[in-house]
Image (tube, helix red, strand yellow):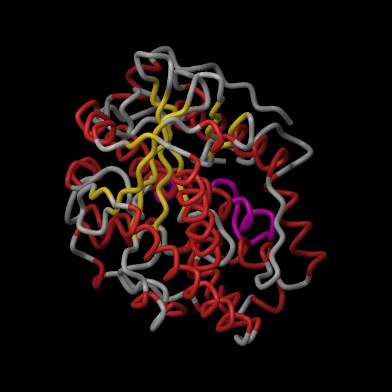
């Protein structure tokens, strides 16, 4: 079944006015557009494999957990601040309120809805008010965060891009870039690879701590690409207790200025692919920034070397810890990780301690059921690449 929905008459209003309340048809148009992009991207690129984690199992559990918990968490956050106020309150890059986590919030939540329906626990008509509360939060925060007047990367200019920094922040970044020679490229490549590998492991082999925005086109035909990578510096993940303290820095933005001969494509949730894939050979200027204090602090080569060594040691320690952990406990870690996307928003709003962050008991108890690889794969396939429709999500309101 392919859902045919006409595009709203006033996309500008839908995409840029946080005070406008979309109609149900307009919400469903947004859900359909997001779901079609999500399905396309998952079918083309994602392979759920991990040495340590049962990816399909924890994806199912965490997204069902999102469906149960996210609406109430959002309502608690809203009692303290609007999404717009929260976005305006802090640096838009280099933290776990990143574009990738914001984009994932409705995608994961709506996937949870589909899973509950496919398992016969809910009907498509259930939970409309909760669903709209989640979408309202995502839409308002996205309008506040983006600087390109769209809600989805595929609608930006150039297509498949995302832009979250303003001209002043762009100028600040450019003023701190340094030319790259071969030695600098090697150091930055090594640092970026170590940091990315550690961030994936800390996040249970998920992408959520690595966010790309750009390309930010420049007047000379080159462009800026930003990669935000955040380790846990706030104590959110108990599985890194005693390890996070060994890292000198936790939140980073790596900026690259690249020539127009390189192409950057940013998917619906905020992961970039470059053509050619070895784009780092073409870097013209670069800089690593630390954002731990909420500002952009450029790091020098000695600080980068220190961070690289510390990250390498932390990676070894965390891998050994996770390898020695019971598989069901590892799965609970992963479920928590994916279901805790709102922690950074709650911290900023000042209501972190008002929210119950524990996993719903029935979700925690579902490990044995969803660790069955045949059932997990059937459920994942039925939601992410459904054969009977061109998007992941069925319409709201039944």
173 inside magenta stretch: no
Residue 231 lies, in percent from the top left, at 40, 63
Residue 211 lies, in percent from the top left, at 45, 46
Taking the spot 69% from the left edge, 60% from the top edge, the residue there is 119
Residue 16 lies, in percent from the top left, at 31, 24
128 inside magenta stretch: yes
Quarter that holds the N terminus: top right
Taking the spot 63% from the left edge, 21% from the top edge, the residue there is 4
State the residue in front, 239 or 307: 307
Taking the spot 75% from the left edge, 50% from the top edge, the residue there is 381
Residue 329 vertical position relative to residue 41 in the rendered view, above or below: below
- Furthest toward the right, the residue is 374
Quarter that holds the C terminus: top right
Quadrant housing residue 173 = top left
Taking the spot 35% from the left edge, 53% from the top edge, the residue there is 301
Residue 236 lies, in percent from the top left, at 36, 71
State the residue in front, 249 or 378: 249
State the residue in front, 215 or 156: 215
Numbered circles on residues, count: 0
Report the magenta residues as a range.
114-131
Left or right of 90 on screen, residue 206: right
């Amino acid at each position: 079944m392919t859902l045919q929905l006409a595009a709203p008459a006033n996309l500008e209003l839908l995409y840029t006015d946080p005070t406008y309340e979309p109609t149900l048809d307009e919400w469903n148009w947004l859900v359909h557009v997001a779901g079609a992009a999500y399905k396309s991207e998952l079918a083309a690129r994602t392979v759920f494999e991990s040495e340590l984690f049962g990816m399909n199992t924890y994806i199912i559990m965490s997204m069902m957990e999102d469906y149960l918990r996210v609406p109430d968490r959002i309502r608690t956050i809203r009692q303290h601040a609007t999404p717009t106020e929260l976005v305006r309150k802090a640096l838009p890059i280099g933290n776990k309120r990143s574009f990738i986590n914001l984009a994932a919030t409705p995608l994961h939540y709506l996937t949870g809805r589909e899973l509950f329906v496919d398992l016969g626990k809910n009907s498509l008509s259930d939970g409309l008010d909760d669903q709209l509360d989640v979408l309202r939060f995502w839409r308002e925060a996205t309008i506040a965060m983006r600087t390109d007047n769209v809600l989805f990367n595929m609608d930006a200019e150039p297509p498949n891009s995302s832009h979250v920094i303003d001209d002043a922040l762009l100028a600040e970044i450019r003023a701190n870039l340094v030319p790259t020679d071969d030695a600098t490229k090697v150091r930055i490549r090594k640092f970026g690879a170590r940091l990315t590998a550690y961030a994936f492991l800390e996040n249970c082999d998920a992408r959520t701590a690595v966010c790309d925005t750009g390309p930010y086109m420049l007047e000379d035909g080159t462009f800026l690409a930003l990669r935000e990578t955040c380790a846990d510096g706030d104590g959110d993940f108990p599985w890194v207790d005693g390890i996070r303290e060994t890292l000198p820095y936790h939140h980073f933005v790596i900026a690259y200025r690249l020539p127009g001969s390189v192409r950057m494509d940013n998917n619906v949730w905020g992961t970039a692919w470059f053509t050619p894939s070895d784009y780092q050979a073409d870097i013209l200027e670069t800089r690593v920034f630390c954002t731990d204090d909420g500002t952009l602090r450029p790091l020098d080569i000695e600080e980068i070397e220190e961070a690289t060594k510390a990250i390498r040691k932390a990676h070894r320690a965390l891998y050994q810890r996770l390898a020695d952990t019971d598989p069901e406990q590892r799965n609970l870690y992963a479920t928590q990780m994916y279901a805790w996307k709102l922690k950074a928003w709650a911290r900023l709003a000042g209501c972190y301690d008002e929210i119950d962050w524990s996993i719903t008991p029935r979700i925690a108890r579902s490990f044995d059921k969803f660790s069955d690889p045949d059932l997990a794969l059937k459920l994942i396939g039925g939601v992410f690449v459904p054969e009977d429709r061109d998007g992941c999500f069925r319409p709201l309101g039944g």
